[in-house]
Amino acid sequence: MPMNPAKTTDALRDKEAALLNLLSGCGRSLLAYSGGVDSGYLAVLCAQSLNGSFLAVLADSPSLPAWEKDEALAFAAEQGIPLRVVRTQETQKAQYRRNAPDRCYHCKAELFAVMEAIARAEGFDSLLYGGNASDPADERPGVEAARRFRARAPLSEAGLDKDEIRELARVRGLSLWDKPARACLASRIPYFSEVSEEKLAQVEAAERLLRELGFREYRVRHHGPIARLEVGAGEWSRFAEAGLRSRIAAGLLSQGFKLVTLDLAAFESGSLSRLSQGGNLTEAREFP
């Protein structure tokens, strides 16, 4: 939803001006780009501020749904954002596949390593990513990977939080301003349950079905033979339709799941992480 008009103030515009000024001092820059609101908005400002001395980098791997890749490519083309798609190999790394709570570190470290190699080969000065002031800097393994590679988070440096970024994207007329938050497909697998390309493909096919059926907020959590669906509270009423339930169940069973369940709690980003915290993590190997 748009911010309260009272928040659309000169102070917010001043933050954007400060961000543009900050970017202008980054030199030739590579941006880790996903096509989400944060990195999409930042990419637009990089293209504006850096005048050709900028390249967005999209990581393509089995943990990225095909439609998210397509949307990211389409937005970059719409906005004239220079973009390179690179293939990352995190799913081949044992530390990533074991799926401990630091999984995101190994994913981001893989991407930043690829970007660093590009920077060295092609003379880029800075690595950037879309971290913002709403991110808990001390709790996210991906932030530690960014520190290791000296990648900067200009949105965070400018003090912009998620709501402010969405509002500034809306004011600019960016088509992704109200895009739901997304996370990689590996986030659907409980900690210490191995991440495999087979599981990622199962989740992608299951979520593609929900997307095609018009759901907006959803996750399919992979608990071995069990698929646990989370949807936004405003969409629960749709499950009163027997035909829809049957189609979803049949679709997910065809992907290899043995049981399909609907979580009675509303969709909440990061719910698997919270289920695994504060208890015995060994219990998260199957159904936390």
Image (cartoon, helix red, strand yellow):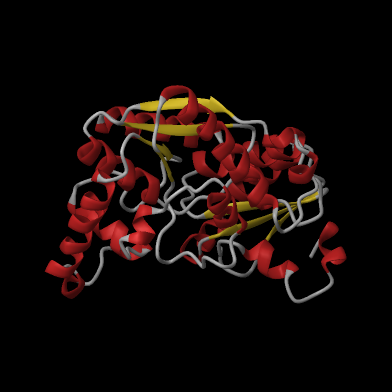
**Residue 182 rendering spot, x and y as whole percentages:** 50, 50
Hey, which quadrant is residue 95 in on the image? top right
**Residue 206 rendering spot, x and y as whole percentages:** 64, 41
**Residue situated in front as seen by the camera: 226 or 146:** 146
**Residue 262 rendering spot, x and y as whole percentages:** 67, 60
**Residue 56 rendering spot, x and y as whole percentages:** 39, 33
**Residue situated in front as seen by the camera: 286 or 252:** 286
The quadrant the C terminus occupies is: bottom right
Q: In the displayed structure, does residue 260 sit left or right of residue 28?
A: right
Q: Residue furthest right?
A: 282
Q: In the displayed structure, does residue 225 sit left or right of residue 121?
A: right
Q: In the displayed structure, does residue 176 sit left or right of residue 91?
A: left
The quadrant the N terminus occupies is: bottom left
Residue 195 visible in the snapshot: yes
Q: In the displayed structure, does residue 24 sit left or right of residue 257?
A: left
Hey, which quadrant is residue 140 in on the image? bottom right
For image coordinates 75% across by 76% down, the residue present is: 278
